[in-house]
Image (tube, grey):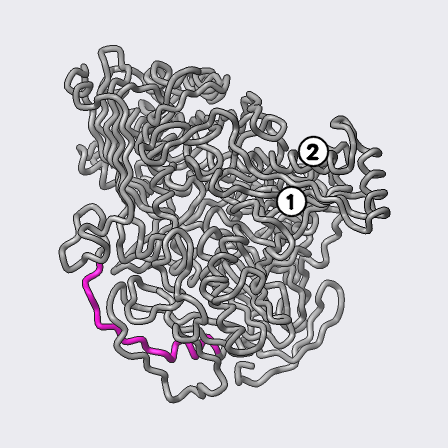
Amino acid sequence: MERIEGLAKLTGRERYVDDLQVDGALWGMTVRSRAPRGRIREIRFDPAVDWSEIVVVDHRDIPGANEVLLIEPDQPVLAAERVRHVHEPVLLLAHPSREVVRRAAHAIEIEVDPEPPYLDVSVPPRPDQLQRGEDNVFKRLRIEKGDVDTALARAARVVEGEYRTGAQEHVYIETQGMLAWEENGVVFIKGSLQCPYYVHKAAIRALGREPDGVRIVQAATGGGFGGKEEYPSMIALHAALLTLAADRPVKIVYDRGEDMEATTKRHPAIVRHRTGVDADGRLVAQDIDVVMDGGAYVTLSPVVLSRGIIHASGPYRCENVRIHGRVMLTNSPPHGAFRGFGAPQTHFANERHMDVVAAAAGLDPIELRRRNLLLDGDETATGQRIVDGVDRIALLDQAVDLSGWREKEAAHAELARTDPWLRRGMGLACFHHGAGFTGSGEVMLASRLDVAGLPDGRVEVRSANIEMGQGTLTIFTAIAAARLGLAPSEVAIAEADTGRVPNSGPTVASRTAMIVGRLVEEACDDLRLRLGLPADARGEEIRQAVREHARATGEETVGRAEYEPPRGVLWDDATYRGDAYAAYGWGAYVAEVEVDLRTWATRVVDFVAVQDVGTVLHRTLAAGQVQGGVAQGIGWALMEECRWKDGAMQNAQLTNYIVPTSFDLPPIRVHFGETPWPGGPMGAKGLGELPIDGPAPAVVNAVARAIGVAPTEIPLTPERLMDLDRRAEGRHARIA
Amino acid sequence: MHGSPELPLSFTLNGDAVSVEADPAARLLDLLRYDLGMTGTKEGCGEGECGACTVWIDGLPADSCLVPAFQVDGREVRTIESVDPARLGPLLSSGATQCGACTPGVVMTGLWILENPGLLRSHAIRELMAGNLCRCTGYDGIIEGIEAALGTRS
């Protein structure tokens, strides 16, 4: 089966929000703070501009609460008295001409009495930088298992390390945008988004409306990667406020610069490890401290931290584990959801550290991991017993074999003897990723999904989960068609419109195929039941019953499903003990890199990605998820650097925020173990995020082995690598 | 709209003669998308880095966000709207498109390679495609699709 909307995309016929042309629509624009923190003293409008022709909205025009409601209501829709980060929205403008509204935005001066910003989480805030409680901590979480202090005291070796990861920009190719209009008293908001019901919840709060007074509709969405999880609510509210003020449709589409400097990024993190091993290199204690930079408002930081610490000790067996995590308020634009959601940061630290531990223990990186990988029946840091039949050591062995590790190591040693400038190395990472919301999250979401029988005999899947390139339309179609014995062309997927589809939860957290896909199956079964058909009814029986039922009753038949956790999956939020996720994907990635000692540039020359994500639902789509995730991970590891100054991103353009091109990457070799997981549709587990957890540590471990340095921070740019080598001993620099 | 004078502009668009009044400084991208309603060509960065807005001008791929409209006067412009869907099968099967935002630009550059296979004597496909950023596929689906299409041709 080909991607459902593939041809529309290949021919340019797919309609994204900026492709929707509405008669009489105005262009909206956001006027933002230039200061990282302070009290708004005065807003000056340049008298040279004719303001009478421009719609201007400020916080006083918000009909409901001035809150972008998500986890906490701390983030204003428009700053009222104070600003807490650069590029914080203060005013909104609209005009029929995009050029006029852009120029008008530049003709407004927001005067701010500055207050001292807090921008560096590696040092504690000074009293005059405090903005939340006594320490600017948004959220503190801990995981405790066994007796870490005693185990460390008795360990044969204790190895310490500190690792840092930088912010990462999503660079979805379609920038963010929203179109809003009012129709029969209902505010419609349509645009680029991952979570229609998040926007809906925020909109009824800020617009002060009943749930049916607002309708959120997804337009074709050109990539998300988490970047369109929470920020679209902000833009949606801005477009809605302008449309209410102007009584005309209003479209806001960010240009690349605005998108990069104002919207969320991956949380920067600092992770410290203190690890005890016994004489055989077996882990006896892991003491881990995680600090993340949350930016100016809470947004999703508590749950990013949660996923980060739960994955921080890696896919390893250890009786004594202590993980402390905190996410801090700073005066950066809020950091937020990005594919992996906290886990890539902690996996980078852990897997880089494992190579350091291996060296200290006198083992090679493969052997250290073989001795410590979780076996079926072992427990994770939260005490979750892993019994899913996946052979994690076999995955590692397969990745090592496919990469040609042993032969290549010999060739690399030869290269180092014979070539003055080029060095090559192999690097490895083992990792896991929990699918679905963390802990009791899925139970609280209580997702619902419908499959309706249409009068013409087809069925329609109604869910709030959206297509953003990852393949939702195709996967849902395939699941429903298989479950009911229908052709894919007999399955329609409803537009994600909160006025038409139930809340099946957000399109995030590797949950769509596994959790919502399972709901598609259950709703198909329920439809069959409501049609009065036996459980094995398929194809023509379904078609006929659907048609007859519609003829007889004049109504469509709707099969319904609601999430119930798999039996025996238990989580305790108070103690952070139990089954953190219903299922995990497992990965073992190997990178081969080449470092040029003249330029300090690192090139990835080969990459092997082996993973087990249960049954693979669609080969091409699944491989594409892995290859795309690996590419983003390589970018984060080597080149994607947000440069900050006084809380503002300095390189908010694709000219100097560098993402990998086709010429920067080797073919990504993808292999799947396929141990079916009975809780998922046709045995599938979540896949989308796993592939971004492994590349950064694999690549950096390879660089470390190529030239004999010990990098601890990404992105490992040429500049950073050169400095690192000079600080270490300057060996290569002297040669150069 | 910009307050600057609009000038008459004539060019060939996908084989048809087009005459418009346009701000000569307007971007070709905006002229195509907003004035002529041909929204298949996408904006990704507005500064010639990502290639999402790739069109052909006189047979060569160009970033339409960097081309002032007056520069196409008397020339031949070809956009994604001109592409025969029947040619796109290999790209569909290989997973060359995911979110689709970079895709029209990818297709226009890919088509340029297909119609000028001599380029491959001196350049790899990965090198020729390096002006089209894709954030979804990791490029393997794109490269494989173009390879498959080349195979179909020969």
Q: Give the crowd class for mark 2: few <14, some 14-19, many >=20 residues within 10 Å.
A: many
Residue A352 located left or right of residue B36 = left
Above or below A568: residue B27: below
Q: Is residue B110 left or right of residue A410?
A: right
Which percent across, then down, holds residue A140? 27, 42
Segment colored magenta: A101-117
Q: Chain of mark 1?
A: B
**Residue A678 occupies quadrant:** top right
Tags 2 and 1 on a common chain: no
* Image point (76%, 48%), residue name: A556
**Residue under the image location 54 percent in, 64 percent down:** B65
Q: Chain of mark 2?
A: A
Could you say which disc has been placed on residue B118 in the image? 1
Name which quarter of the figure residue A213 lies in: bottom right
Residue at position x 56%, y 63% in the image? A214
Element at label 2: helix
Q: Is residue B52 above or below residue A735?
A: below
Q: Give A599 or A237, whichever is nearer the viewer.
A: A237
Tell me the quadrant of the picture where the C terminus of chain A can be found. top left
Q: Is residue A368 magenta?
A: no
Q: In which quadrant is the N terminus of chain A drawn?
A: top right
Residue A247 percent coordinates (x, y): 56, 78
Which x, y percent locates residue A538? 78, 31
Query: Residues under labels 2 and 1: Cα distance?
Result: 56 Å
Q: Is residue B61 visible?
A: no
Q: Pointer 2: what residue?
A: A525
- Residue B150's spot in the image, x, y percent? 69, 40
Q: Amino acid at mark 1?
A: Gly
Structural crowding at the residue carrying mark 1, measured as other residues with C-alpha within 10 Å and reported as few (<14), some (14–19) or many (≥20): few
